[in-house]
Amino acid sequence: MIRITVIRKNRYFDSVFLMQVARRIAGQPGVNDASALLATDANKKVLTELGYGQGGQDADFAAAGPNDLVLALEGEEAAIRTVAADPEAWLRRSTAASAATEAPRDPRSIREAVEARPDSNVAVISVPGEYAAREARAALDQGLNVFLFSSNVSVEDELSLKRAARDRGLVVMGPDCGTAFLCGAGIGFANAVRRGPIGIVGSSGTGMQEFSCLVHAAGSGISHAIGTGSRDLSDAIGGISTLTAIDALETDPGTSVIAILSKPPGESATRKLMQRLARCDKPVVLCLFGAAAMPAETGNLLTASVIDDAVEMALQKTGLGGSVMPRPSREALRAQAAAEVARMRPAQRHVRGLFAGGTFCYQSQAIFRRAGLVVYSNSPIHGMKELADPRASLESSFVDMGAEIFVEGRPHPMIDASLRRKRLAEEGQDPSVALVLLDFILGAISSRDPVGDLVPAIHAVRESARRRGDHVTVVGSVCGTDADAQGLEAQMGALADAGVLVFPSNAQAAAFCREAALLLAARKEVR
Amino acid sequence: MAEPLKDLLRGKPVFVNVGVREFGDTLHAAGYEVVHVDWSPPAGGNAEMAALLDDLL
Protein backbone atom coordinates (compact mmCIF):
# COMPACT_ATOMS: atom_id res chain seq x y z
CA MET A 1 0.00 0.00 0.00
CA ILE A 2 1.22 3.52 -0.78
CA ARG A 3 0.13 7.02 0.20
CA ILE A 4 1.10 9.90 -2.08
CA THR A 5 0.15 13.46 -3.00
CA VAL A 6 -0.02 14.94 -6.50
CA ILE A 7 0.13 18.74 -6.85
CA ARG A 8 -1.29 20.74 -9.76
CA LYS A 9 0.01 24.31 -9.55
CA ASN A 10 -2.42 27.22 -10.00
CA ARG A 11 -5.47 25.12 -10.72
CA TYR A 12 -8.74 26.42 -9.34
CA PHE A 13 -11.80 24.22 -9.00
CA ASP A 14 -14.75 24.80 -6.74
CA SER A 15 -14.79 22.69 -3.58
CA VAL A 16 -17.98 20.79 -4.48
CA PHE A 17 -16.52 19.67 -7.80
CA LEU A 18 -13.34 18.56 -6.02
CA MET A 19 -15.36 16.49 -3.56
CA GLN A 20 -17.00 14.73 -6.52
CA VAL A 21 -13.57 14.12 -8.09
CA ALA A 22 -12.36 12.59 -4.82
CA ARG A 23 -15.41 10.34 -4.63
CA ARG A 24 -14.92 9.11 -8.20
CA ILE A 25 -11.26 8.31 -7.55
CA ALA A 26 -12.05 6.64 -4.22
CA GLY A 27 -14.52 4.40 -6.05
CA GLN A 28 -11.75 2.85 -8.17
CA PRO A 29 -10.66 -0.70 -7.34
CA GLY A 30 -7.47 -0.68 -5.25
CA VAL A 31 -7.98 2.91 -4.00
CA ASN A 32 -8.62 3.07 -0.24
CA ASP A 33 -8.81 6.82 0.23
CA ALA A 34 -8.73 9.89 -2.01
CA SER A 35 -8.98 13.62 -1.34
CA ALA A 36 -8.96 16.47 -3.84
CA LEU A 37 -8.52 19.81 -2.10
CA LEU A 38 -7.06 23.26 -2.54
CA ALA A 39 -3.80 23.31 -0.61
CA THR A 40 -4.91 25.76 2.08
CA ASP A 41 -3.10 25.58 5.41
CA ALA A 42 -6.19 24.01 7.01
CA ASN A 43 -6.46 21.30 4.35
CA LYS A 44 -2.73 20.57 4.47
CA LYS A 45 -3.00 20.14 8.24
CA VAL A 46 -5.85 17.63 7.87
CA LEU A 47 -3.93 15.71 5.21
CA THR A 48 -0.78 15.70 7.33
CA GLU A 49 -2.78 14.27 10.24
CA LEU A 50 -3.97 11.53 7.88
CA GLY A 51 -0.32 10.69 7.19
CA TYR A 52 0.14 12.45 3.85
CA GLY A 53 3.12 14.59 2.92
CA GLN A 54 5.47 12.67 5.19
CA GLY A 55 9.06 12.05 4.21
CA GLY A 56 11.35 13.80 1.76
CA GLN A 57 9.52 12.83 -1.43
CA ASP A 58 6.75 15.33 -0.76
CA ALA A 59 8.57 18.65 -1.15
CA ASP A 60 5.88 19.74 -3.65
CA PHE A 61 3.21 19.18 -0.99
CA ALA A 62 5.11 21.28 1.54
CA ALA A 63 5.46 24.12 -1.01
CA ALA A 64 1.86 24.01 -2.25
CA GLY A 65 -0.39 26.99 -1.49
CA PRO A 66 -4.09 27.89 -1.57
CA ASN A 67 -4.12 28.34 -5.37
CA ASP A 68 -2.75 24.85 -5.93
CA LEU A 69 -4.68 21.64 -6.10
CA VAL A 70 -3.61 18.60 -4.11
CA LEU A 71 -4.74 15.07 -4.82
CA ALA A 72 -4.06 12.83 -1.82
CA LEU A 73 -4.22 9.14 -2.69
CA GLU A 74 -3.89 5.96 -0.66
CA GLY A 75 -4.19 2.38 -1.81
CA GLU A 76 -2.53 -0.40 -3.79
CA GLU A 77 0.53 0.86 -5.61
CA ALA A 78 -0.62 -0.06 -9.13
CA ALA A 79 -4.02 1.61 -8.71
CA ILE A 80 -2.56 4.76 -7.18
CA ARG A 81 0.15 5.07 -9.85
CA THR A 82 -2.52 4.77 -12.57
CA VAL A 83 -4.51 7.69 -11.11
CA ALA A 84 -1.38 9.77 -10.49
CA ALA A 85 -0.12 9.21 -14.05
CA ASP A 86 -3.02 11.17 -15.55
CA PRO A 87 -4.62 13.45 -12.95
CA GLU A 88 -6.16 15.68 -15.63
CA ALA A 89 -8.39 12.83 -16.73
CA TRP A 90 -10.13 13.09 -13.36
CA LEU A 91 -10.43 16.85 -13.46
CA ARG A 92 -12.56 17.16 -16.59
CA ARG A 93 -16.16 18.10 -16.05
CA SER A 94 -18.69 15.85 -17.71
CA THR A 95 -20.89 17.59 -20.28
CA ALA A 96 -23.92 16.84 -18.12
CA ALA A 97 -22.43 18.96 -15.34
CA SER A 98 -22.44 21.95 -17.67
CA ALA A 99 -26.19 21.85 -18.20
CA ALA A 100 -26.67 25.38 -16.88
CA THR A 101 -25.47 26.91 -20.12
CA GLU A 102 -26.07 26.23 -23.76
CA ALA A 103 -23.50 28.77 -24.95
CA PRO A 104 -20.42 27.32 -26.68
CA ARG A 105 -18.19 29.09 -24.15
CA ASP A 106 -19.18 30.36 -20.71
CA PRO A 107 -18.57 34.05 -20.10
CA ARG A 108 -15.40 34.73 -18.15
CA SER A 109 -16.73 37.63 -16.08
CA ILE A 110 -19.96 38.99 -14.63
CA ARG A 111 -19.85 41.82 -17.16
CA GLU A 112 -19.70 39.34 -20.04
CA ALA A 113 -22.53 37.34 -18.46
CA VAL A 114 -24.78 40.41 -18.27
CA GLU A 115 -23.92 41.27 -21.88
CA ALA A 116 -25.14 37.78 -22.78
CA ARG A 117 -28.28 38.07 -20.61
CA PRO A 118 -29.14 41.75 -20.10
CA ASP A 119 -32.23 40.75 -18.08
CA SER A 120 -30.07 39.11 -15.37
CA ASN A 121 -31.00 40.43 -11.92
CA VAL A 122 -29.31 38.23 -9.27
CA ALA A 123 -25.65 37.22 -8.96
CA VAL A 124 -24.98 34.04 -6.96
CA ILE A 125 -21.37 34.31 -5.77
CA SER A 126 -19.46 31.49 -4.05
CA VAL A 127 -15.81 32.14 -4.93
CA PRO A 128 -13.11 31.98 -2.20
CA GLY A 129 -13.53 34.79 0.34
CA GLU A 130 -10.52 36.83 -0.70
CA TYR A 131 -12.04 37.38 -4.17
CA ALA A 132 -15.69 37.60 -3.11
CA ALA A 133 -15.90 41.37 -2.53
CA ARG A 134 -14.36 42.02 -5.94
CA GLU A 135 -16.99 39.89 -7.69
CA ALA A 136 -19.84 41.34 -5.60
CA ARG A 137 -18.74 44.85 -6.56
CA ALA A 138 -18.69 43.84 -10.22
CA ALA A 139 -22.24 42.46 -9.86
CA LEU A 140 -23.55 45.65 -8.22
CA ASP A 141 -21.90 47.70 -10.99
CA GLN A 142 -23.94 45.67 -13.46
CA GLY A 143 -27.16 46.38 -11.53
CA LEU A 144 -27.50 42.90 -10.04
CA ASN A 145 -28.76 41.97 -6.59
CA VAL A 146 -26.12 39.84 -4.87
CA PHE A 147 -26.42 36.50 -3.08
CA LEU A 148 -22.96 36.17 -1.48
CA PHE A 149 -22.40 32.64 -0.21
CA SER A 150 -18.68 33.23 0.36
CA SER A 151 -17.47 33.87 3.88
CA ASN A 152 -14.21 35.45 5.00
CA VAL A 153 -15.14 38.91 3.67
CA SER A 154 -13.97 41.85 5.81
CA VAL A 155 -16.45 44.08 7.67
CA GLU A 156 -15.10 47.08 5.72
CA ASP A 157 -15.83 45.38 2.39
CA GLU A 158 -19.25 44.28 3.59
CA LEU A 159 -20.16 47.81 4.65
CA SER A 160 -18.97 49.39 1.41
CA LEU A 161 -20.82 46.78 -0.69
CA LYS A 162 -24.06 47.23 1.24
CA ARG A 163 -23.90 51.01 1.03
CA ALA A 164 -23.34 50.80 -2.70
CA ALA A 165 -26.29 48.41 -3.01
CA ARG A 166 -28.59 50.62 -0.94
CA ASP A 167 -27.80 53.62 -3.16
CA ARG A 168 -28.99 51.62 -6.16
CA GLY A 169 -32.09 49.97 -4.69
CA LEU A 170 -30.31 46.60 -4.65
CA VAL A 171 -29.65 44.15 -1.84
CA VAL A 172 -26.53 42.25 -0.81
CA MET A 173 -27.57 38.94 0.73
CA GLY A 174 -24.40 37.99 2.64
CA PRO A 175 -21.52 37.54 2.98
CA ASP A 176 -21.80 34.10 4.54
CA CYS A 177 -25.38 33.80 3.30
CA GLY A 178 -26.46 30.16 3.21
CA THR A 179 -29.86 30.44 1.65
CA ALA A 180 -32.51 32.59 -0.01
CA PHE A 181 -35.85 31.93 -1.64
CA LEU A 182 -36.86 34.46 -4.29
CA CYS A 183 -40.10 34.13 -6.26
CA GLY A 184 -40.07 30.36 -5.70
CA ALA A 185 -36.39 29.90 -6.58
CA GLY A 186 -34.40 28.29 -3.77
CA ILE A 187 -30.81 29.58 -3.77
CA GLY A 188 -27.97 27.85 -1.95
CA PHE A 189 -29.08 25.56 0.88
CA ALA A 190 -32.80 25.89 0.24
CA ASN A 191 -35.56 23.34 0.74
CA ALA A 192 -38.49 22.57 -1.51
CA VAL A 193 -41.21 24.60 0.18
CA ARG A 194 -44.46 25.86 -1.27
CA ARG A 195 -45.11 29.54 -1.82
CA GLY A 196 -47.38 31.31 0.62
CA PRO A 197 -48.02 34.48 2.59
CA ILE A 198 -45.01 34.54 4.96
CA GLY A 199 -41.91 36.54 3.99
CA ILE A 200 -38.60 35.99 5.77
CA VAL A 201 -35.65 38.27 6.43
CA GLY A 202 -32.84 36.34 8.05
CA SER A 203 -29.22 36.47 9.05
CA SER A 204 -29.14 32.76 9.85
CA GLY A 205 -29.31 30.33 6.97
CA THR A 206 -30.32 27.16 8.77
CA GLY A 207 -32.77 29.16 10.88
CA MET A 208 -34.48 30.26 7.67
CA GLN A 209 -34.47 26.68 6.40
CA GLU A 210 -36.01 25.24 9.56
CA PHE A 211 -38.59 28.04 9.73
CA SER A 212 -39.57 27.49 6.05
CA CYS A 213 -39.81 23.72 6.47
CA LEU A 214 -41.99 23.97 9.59
CA VAL A 215 -44.26 26.50 7.83
CA HIS A 216 -44.49 24.10 4.89
CA ALA A 217 -45.26 21.17 7.20
CA ALA A 218 -48.11 23.21 8.68
CA GLY A 219 -49.64 23.61 5.22
CA SER A 220 -48.67 27.24 4.64
CA GLY A 221 -45.80 28.68 2.61
CA ILE A 222 -43.15 31.32 1.96
CA SER A 223 -43.43 34.36 -0.35
CA HIS A 224 -39.73 35.23 -0.36
CA ALA A 225 -36.84 34.62 2.01
CA ILE A 226 -34.15 37.27 1.86
CA GLY A 227 -30.86 36.38 3.55
CA THR A 228 -28.76 39.20 4.93
CA GLY A 229 -25.49 37.61 6.07
CA SER A 230 -24.62 36.80 9.67
CA ARG A 231 -23.21 40.25 10.57
CA ASP A 232 -25.89 42.45 9.03
CA LEU A 233 -27.49 43.45 12.35
CA SER A 234 -24.16 44.14 14.02
CA ASP A 235 -23.61 47.79 14.89
CA ALA A 236 -20.78 47.93 12.33
CA ILE A 237 -23.16 47.17 9.44
CA GLY A 238 -26.30 48.64 10.99
CA GLY A 239 -28.76 46.25 9.38
CA ILE A 240 -28.54 47.77 5.89
CA SER A 241 -29.70 44.61 4.10
CA THR A 242 -32.30 43.80 6.76
CA LEU A 243 -33.89 47.25 6.36
CA THR A 244 -33.81 47.01 2.54
CA ALA A 245 -35.45 43.58 2.73
CA ILE A 246 -38.19 44.80 5.12
CA ASP A 247 -38.96 47.67 2.70
CA ALA A 248 -39.26 45.21 -0.18
CA LEU A 249 -41.47 42.72 1.69
CA GLU A 250 -43.68 45.46 3.08
CA THR A 251 -44.64 46.51 -0.45
CA ASP A 252 -44.76 42.96 -1.83
CA PRO A 253 -48.41 42.05 -2.44
CA GLY A 254 -47.69 38.33 -1.91
CA THR A 255 -46.42 38.85 1.66
CA SER A 256 -48.89 39.30 4.53
CA VAL A 257 -46.59 38.53 7.50
CA ILE A 258 -42.86 39.26 7.86
CA ALA A 259 -40.64 37.02 9.99
CA ILE A 260 -37.20 38.31 10.97
CA LEU A 261 -34.73 35.65 12.13
CA SER A 262 -31.41 36.74 13.61
CA LYS A 263 -28.85 36.47 16.34
CA PRO A 264 -29.30 39.30 18.88
CA PRO A 265 -28.60 42.60 17.07
CA GLY A 266 -26.13 45.22 18.28
CA GLU A 267 -27.41 48.10 20.39
CA SER A 268 -27.66 50.80 17.73
CA ALA A 269 -28.80 48.27 15.11
CA THR A 270 -31.62 47.26 17.49
CA ARG A 271 -32.73 50.89 17.75
CA LYS A 272 -32.79 51.28 13.96
CA LEU A 273 -34.64 48.01 13.54
CA MET A 274 -37.25 48.80 16.20
CA GLN A 275 -37.85 52.28 14.74
CA ARG A 276 -38.44 50.72 11.35
CA LEU A 277 -40.72 47.98 12.72
CA ALA A 278 -42.79 50.56 14.61
CA ARG A 279 -43.97 51.98 11.27
CA CYS A 280 -44.30 48.66 9.41
CA ASP A 281 -47.77 48.16 7.92
CA LYS A 282 -47.61 44.38 8.14
CA PRO A 283 -47.45 42.09 11.20
CA VAL A 284 -43.88 41.14 12.14
CA VAL A 285 -42.55 38.16 14.10
CA LEU A 286 -39.07 38.91 15.42
CA CYS A 287 -37.12 35.79 16.39
CA LEU A 288 -33.79 36.48 18.09
CA PHE A 289 -31.77 33.36 18.93
CA GLY A 290 -29.95 33.50 22.23
CA ALA A 291 -31.13 37.02 23.11
CA ALA A 292 -30.83 37.81 26.82
CA ALA A 293 -33.71 40.33 26.64
CA MET A 294 -36.47 40.75 24.09
CA PRO A 295 -37.83 44.02 22.70
CA ALA A 296 -41.36 44.82 23.89
CA GLU A 297 -44.19 43.32 21.87
CA THR A 298 -46.85 45.53 20.32
CA GLY A 299 -50.07 44.73 18.49
CA ASN A 300 -48.17 44.32 15.23
CA LEU A 301 -44.94 42.86 16.62
CA LEU A 302 -44.49 39.48 18.29
CA THR A 303 -41.16 38.20 19.60
CA ALA A 304 -39.72 34.70 20.00
CA SER A 305 -36.37 33.13 20.83
CA VAL A 306 -37.05 29.67 19.37
CA ILE A 307 -37.90 28.90 15.73
CA ASP A 308 -40.88 26.69 16.60
CA ASP A 309 -42.55 29.54 18.53
CA ALA A 310 -41.88 31.99 15.70
CA VAL A 311 -43.52 29.60 13.21
CA GLU A 312 -46.61 29.30 15.37
CA MET A 313 -46.88 33.10 15.74
CA ALA A 314 -46.42 33.72 12.01
CA LEU A 315 -49.08 31.14 11.14
CA GLN A 316 -51.51 32.79 13.57
CA LYS A 317 -50.84 36.21 12.04
CA THR A 318 -51.62 34.98 8.52
CA GLY A 319 -55.12 34.31 9.82
CA LEU A 320 -55.24 31.19 7.68
CA GLY A 321 -54.58 28.75 10.50
CA GLY A 322 -52.53 25.67 9.66
CA SER A 323 -51.85 22.58 11.67
CA VAL A 324 -48.79 23.19 13.79
CA MET A 325 -46.72 20.10 14.67
CA PRO A 326 -47.46 18.38 17.97
CA ARG A 327 -45.20 19.58 20.77
CA PRO A 328 -44.61 17.27 23.72
CA SER A 329 -44.98 18.74 27.19
CA ARG A 330 -41.91 19.24 29.34
CA GLU A 331 -43.13 16.44 31.63
CA ALA A 332 -43.37 14.05 28.70
CA LEU A 333 -39.83 14.94 27.56
CA ARG A 334 -38.55 14.49 31.12
CA ALA A 335 -40.10 11.04 31.42
CA GLN A 336 -38.62 10.00 28.09
CA ALA A 337 -35.22 11.39 29.15
CA ALA A 338 -35.39 9.60 32.51
CA ALA A 339 -35.79 6.26 30.77
CA GLU A 340 -32.59 6.90 28.78
CA VAL A 341 -30.60 8.28 31.72
CA ALA A 342 -31.50 5.22 33.82
CA ARG A 343 -29.47 3.09 31.39
CA MET A 344 -26.33 5.26 31.64
CA ARG A 345 -23.37 4.60 33.91
CA PRO A 346 -22.31 7.22 36.51
CA ALA A 347 -19.21 8.24 34.52
CA GLN A 348 -21.42 9.29 31.62
CA ARG A 349 -22.16 12.96 32.20
CA HIS A 350 -21.76 14.98 29.03
CA VAL A 351 -23.75 16.04 25.97
CA ARG A 352 -21.95 16.49 22.66
CA GLY A 353 -23.74 18.41 19.92
CA LEU A 354 -22.21 18.25 16.44
CA PHE A 355 -24.10 20.62 14.17
CA ALA A 356 -24.06 21.12 10.43
CA GLY A 357 -26.34 24.13 10.92
CA GLY A 358 -24.89 27.12 12.80
CA THR A 359 -28.32 28.29 13.95
CA PHE A 360 -29.00 24.89 15.48
CA CYS A 361 -25.79 25.16 17.51
CA TYR A 362 -26.93 28.60 18.65
CA GLN A 363 -30.54 27.67 19.37
CA SER A 364 -29.53 24.54 21.30
CA GLN A 365 -27.29 26.62 23.55
CA ALA A 366 -30.15 29.07 24.16
CA ILE A 367 -32.41 26.18 25.17
CA PHE A 368 -29.76 24.85 27.57
CA ARG A 369 -29.00 28.30 28.98
CA ARG A 370 -32.62 28.90 29.90
CA ALA A 371 -32.40 25.87 32.21
CA GLY A 372 -29.18 27.15 33.78
CA LEU A 373 -26.97 24.67 31.93
CA VAL A 374 -23.56 25.76 30.62
CA VAL A 375 -21.80 24.16 27.66
CA TYR A 376 -18.63 24.83 25.70
CA SER A 377 -18.96 25.99 22.11
CA ASN A 378 -16.81 27.29 19.27
CA SER A 379 -19.71 29.69 18.65
CA PRO A 380 -20.77 30.51 22.23
CA ILE A 381 -23.82 32.62 23.04
CA HIS A 382 -23.66 34.97 26.02
CA GLY A 383 -23.08 32.98 29.20
CA MET A 384 -21.56 29.92 27.54
CA LYS A 385 -17.88 28.95 27.54
CA GLU A 386 -15.60 29.35 24.53
CA LEU A 387 -14.22 26.06 23.21
CA ALA A 388 -10.60 27.09 22.69
CA ASP A 389 -9.83 24.28 20.24
CA PRO A 390 -12.96 23.59 18.16
CA ARG A 391 -11.41 20.26 17.14
CA ALA A 392 -11.56 18.82 20.68
CA SER A 393 -14.68 18.76 22.87
CA LEU A 394 -14.59 19.54 26.59
CA GLU A 395 -17.25 18.35 29.05
CA SER A 396 -20.56 19.21 27.36
CA SER A 397 -19.76 20.85 24.02
CA PHE A 398 -21.86 22.14 21.11
CA VAL A 399 -19.75 22.41 17.98
CA ASP A 400 -20.71 24.33 14.84
CA MET A 401 -19.06 22.14 12.19
CA GLY A 402 -19.84 24.80 9.56
CA ALA A 403 -17.50 27.31 11.24
CA GLU A 404 -14.75 28.77 9.08
CA ILE A 405 -12.04 26.61 10.64
CA PHE A 406 -13.83 23.50 9.33
CA VAL A 407 -14.85 24.75 5.86
CA GLU A 408 -11.86 26.66 4.56
CA GLY A 409 -11.13 25.17 1.13
CA ARG A 410 -13.65 22.35 1.53
CA PRO A 411 -17.42 21.96 1.20
CA HIS A 412 -19.81 22.74 4.02
CA PRO A 413 -20.74 19.80 6.33
CA MET A 414 -24.26 19.83 4.84
CA ILE A 415 -22.62 18.71 1.58
CA ASP A 416 -19.58 16.78 2.75
CA ALA A 417 -20.08 14.81 5.96
CA SER A 418 -16.52 13.49 6.24
CA LEU A 419 -15.26 15.80 9.02
CA ARG A 420 -18.44 15.40 11.08
CA ARG A 421 -18.31 11.63 10.61
CA LYS A 422 -14.72 11.57 11.85
CA ARG A 423 -15.58 13.80 14.80
CA LEU A 424 -18.59 11.66 15.72
CA ALA A 425 -16.37 8.57 15.80
CA GLU A 426 -13.97 10.43 18.12
CA GLU A 427 -16.77 11.42 20.50
CA GLY A 428 -17.79 7.76 20.62
CA GLN A 429 -14.43 6.86 22.16
CA ASP A 430 -14.99 9.16 25.14
CA PRO A 431 -16.52 7.28 28.12
CA SER A 432 -17.82 10.53 29.65
CA VAL A 433 -20.30 11.00 26.79
CA ALA A 434 -23.96 10.36 27.65
CA LEU A 435 -25.82 11.96 24.74
CA VAL A 436 -25.00 13.02 21.20
CA LEU A 437 -27.17 15.66 19.51
CA LEU A 438 -27.15 15.86 15.70
CA ASP A 439 -28.93 17.79 12.96
CA PHE A 440 -29.58 16.67 9.38
CA ILE A 441 -30.35 19.21 6.70
CA LEU A 442 -31.99 18.29 3.41
CA GLY A 443 -32.22 20.38 0.25
CA ALA A 444 -31.13 20.60 -3.37
CA ILE A 445 -27.48 21.43 -2.63
CA SER A 446 -27.15 19.21 0.44
CA SER A 447 -25.72 15.70 0.42
CA ARG A 448 -27.89 13.16 -1.40
CA ASP A 449 -28.20 11.18 1.83
CA PRO A 450 -27.34 13.25 4.94
CA VAL A 451 -28.54 10.54 7.33
CA GLY A 452 -26.86 7.69 5.43
CA ASP A 453 -23.56 9.61 5.53
CA LEU A 454 -23.52 9.38 9.33
CA VAL A 455 -25.30 6.08 10.03
CA PRO A 456 -22.09 3.98 10.08
CA ALA A 457 -20.53 6.42 12.55
CA ILE A 458 -23.71 6.38 14.68
CA HIS A 459 -23.57 2.58 14.79
CA ALA A 460 -19.87 2.77 15.71
CA VAL A 461 -20.61 5.19 18.60
CA ARG A 462 -23.33 2.96 19.99
CA GLU A 463 -21.24 -0.17 19.52
CA SER A 464 -18.12 1.16 21.23
CA ALA A 465 -20.31 2.39 24.10
CA ARG A 466 -21.92 -1.03 24.35
CA ARG A 467 -18.50 -2.70 24.56
CA ARG A 468 -17.63 -0.43 27.50
CA GLY A 469 -20.93 -1.28 29.16
CA ASP A 470 -22.25 2.25 28.48
CA HIS A 471 -25.47 3.42 26.87
CA VAL A 472 -25.07 6.50 24.66
CA THR A 473 -28.31 8.12 23.49
CA VAL A 474 -28.13 9.64 20.02
CA VAL A 475 -30.70 12.37 19.41
CA GLY A 476 -31.44 14.00 16.07
CA SER A 477 -33.76 16.15 13.99
CA VAL A 478 -34.17 16.46 10.24
CA CYS A 479 -34.70 19.84 8.58
CA GLY A 480 -36.49 19.27 5.27
CA THR A 481 -39.78 18.74 3.51
CA ASP A 482 -41.67 15.94 1.81
CA ALA A 483 -40.77 17.61 -1.50
CA ASP A 484 -36.98 17.59 -0.94
CA ALA A 485 -35.16 15.04 -3.10
CA GLN A 486 -33.88 13.17 -0.04
CA GLY A 487 -37.42 12.76 1.34
CA LEU A 488 -38.14 13.88 4.89
CA GLU A 489 -39.96 10.73 5.88
CA ALA A 490 -37.28 8.42 4.44
CA GLN A 491 -34.50 10.29 6.23
CA MET A 492 -36.35 10.32 9.56
CA GLY A 493 -37.10 6.63 9.13
CA ALA A 494 -33.44 5.80 8.45
CA LEU A 495 -32.43 7.71 11.58
CA ALA A 496 -34.97 5.87 13.72
CA ASP A 497 -33.77 2.55 12.23
CA ALA A 498 -30.25 3.46 13.37
CA GLY A 499 -31.56 3.71 16.95
CA VAL A 500 -31.62 7.51 17.03
CA LEU A 501 -34.35 9.36 18.96
CA VAL A 502 -35.82 11.52 16.21
CA PHE A 503 -37.64 14.82 16.83
CA PRO A 504 -39.49 16.99 14.30
CA SER A 505 -37.40 20.07 15.04
CA ASN A 506 -34.01 20.99 16.46
CA ALA A 507 -35.73 22.89 19.30
CA GLN A 508 -37.52 19.73 20.41
CA ALA A 509 -34.37 17.60 20.12
CA ALA A 510 -32.40 20.14 22.16
CA ALA A 511 -35.20 20.35 24.75
CA PHE A 512 -35.04 16.57 25.16
CA CYS A 513 -31.25 16.75 25.67
CA ARG A 514 -31.76 19.59 28.17
CA GLU A 515 -34.07 17.38 30.26
CA ALA A 516 -31.55 14.53 30.14
CA ALA A 517 -28.69 16.90 31.06
CA LEU A 518 -30.67 18.19 34.06
CA LEU A 519 -31.28 14.61 35.23
CA LEU A 520 -27.58 13.76 34.78
CA ALA A 521 -26.58 16.85 36.80
CA ALA A 522 -29.06 15.98 39.57
CA ARG A 523 -27.72 12.43 39.67
CA LYS A 524 -24.19 13.75 40.14
CA GLU A 525 -25.28 15.95 43.04
CA VAL A 526 -26.99 13.04 44.82
CA ARG A 527 -23.84 10.89 44.70
CA MET B 1 -35.12 56.05 -7.11
CA ALA B 2 -34.72 52.79 -9.03
CA GLU B 3 -36.23 49.81 -7.23
CA PRO B 4 -34.55 46.77 -8.78
CA LEU B 5 -35.06 44.57 -5.67
CA LYS B 6 -38.80 45.30 -5.55
CA ASP B 7 -39.01 44.69 -9.31
CA LEU B 8 -37.23 41.37 -8.81
CA LEU B 9 -39.76 40.20 -6.20
CA ARG B 10 -42.62 41.02 -8.58
CA GLY B 11 -40.99 39.36 -11.58
CA LYS B 12 -38.82 36.36 -12.32
CA PRO B 13 -35.21 36.01 -11.29
CA VAL B 14 -32.50 35.50 -13.91
CA PHE B 15 -29.26 34.36 -12.32
CA VAL B 16 -25.57 34.85 -12.95
CA ASN B 17 -23.65 32.11 -11.12
CA VAL B 18 -20.01 32.67 -10.12
CA GLY B 19 -18.20 29.92 -8.23
CA VAL B 20 -19.65 26.55 -7.18
CA ARG B 21 -21.28 25.24 -10.33
CA GLU B 22 -23.94 23.19 -8.49
CA PHE B 23 -25.65 26.38 -7.31
CA GLY B 24 -26.35 27.34 -10.91
CA ASP B 25 -27.11 23.79 -12.05
CA THR B 26 -29.70 23.39 -9.28
CA LEU B 27 -31.49 26.60 -10.26
CA HIS B 28 -31.34 25.60 -13.93
CA ALA B 29 -32.80 22.17 -13.12
CA ALA B 30 -35.65 23.92 -11.26
CA GLY B 31 -36.52 25.82 -14.43
CA TYR B 32 -34.74 29.15 -13.88
CA GLU B 33 -32.50 30.99 -16.32
CA VAL B 34 -28.84 30.83 -15.29
CA VAL B 35 -25.68 32.13 -16.92
CA HIS B 36 -22.61 30.46 -15.47
CA VAL B 37 -19.36 32.42 -15.30
CA ASP B 38 -16.24 30.36 -15.96
CA TRP B 39 -14.36 31.86 -13.03
CA SER B 40 -10.75 31.48 -11.98
CA PRO B 41 -8.73 33.55 -9.50
CA PRO B 42 -7.74 36.87 -11.11
CA ALA B 43 -4.07 37.69 -11.74
CA GLY B 44 -3.12 34.05 -11.28
CA GLY B 45 -4.34 33.98 -7.71
CA ASN B 46 -2.55 37.10 -6.53
CA ALA B 47 -5.30 39.09 -4.78
CA GLU B 48 -3.06 42.12 -4.30
CA MET B 49 -2.17 42.22 -7.98
CA ALA B 50 -5.86 41.81 -8.88
CA ALA B 51 -6.75 44.84 -6.74
CA LEU B 52 -4.02 46.90 -8.47
CA LEU B 53 -5.36 45.86 -11.88
CA ASP B 54 -8.91 46.77 -10.81
CA ASP B 55 -7.71 50.25 -9.91
CA LEU B 56 -6.02 50.65 -13.30
CA LEU B 57 -8.98 49.43 -15.38
Image (cartoon, grey):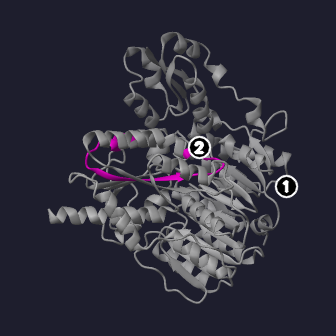
Q: Which circle, 2 or 1, is nearer the viewer?
A: 2
In terms of depth relative to the viewer, which is nearer, A235 or A469?
A469
Q: Judge whether residue A91 can be spotted in this image.
A: yes
Chain bearing mark 2? A
Q: Pointer 2 and pointer 1: residues touching (CB < 8 Å)?
A: no
Q: CA–CA distance between discs 2 and 1?
A: 32 Å
Specify the amino acid type for callout 1: Asp
Query: x, y (%) of residue B23?
Result: 68, 46
Specify the amino acid type for callout 2: Ser
Residue name at image x 53 percent, y 32 percent: A37
As helix, strand or loop, the secondary structure at mark 1 comes to: loop
Q: Above or below — where is A472 with respect to A456? A: below
Let me know if residue A445 is in the magenta part.
Answer: yes
In terms of depth relative to the viewer, which is nearer, A311 or A100?
A311
User: Few, some or many C-alpha atoms within 10 Å of disc 2 (few <14, some 14-19, many ≥20)?
Assistant: many
| Residues drawn in magenta | A425-450
Query: x, y (%) of residue A51?
Result: 38, 24
In this rendering, would B47 be left or right of A508?
right
The quarter of the picture where residue A242 lies is bottom right
Q: Above or below — where is A324 with respect to A377? A: below
Q: What residue would you read off at disc 2?
A: A447
Residue name at image x 54 percent, y 55 percent: A478
In this rendering, would A288 be left or right of B35?
left
- Labels 2 and 1 positioned on one and the same chain: yes
Query: x, y (%) of residue A454?
Result: 48, 42
Q: Above or below — where is A515 with respect to A150? A: below
Mark 2 or mark 1, which has the lower sequence index?
1
**Which numbered tag is attached to residue A119?**
1
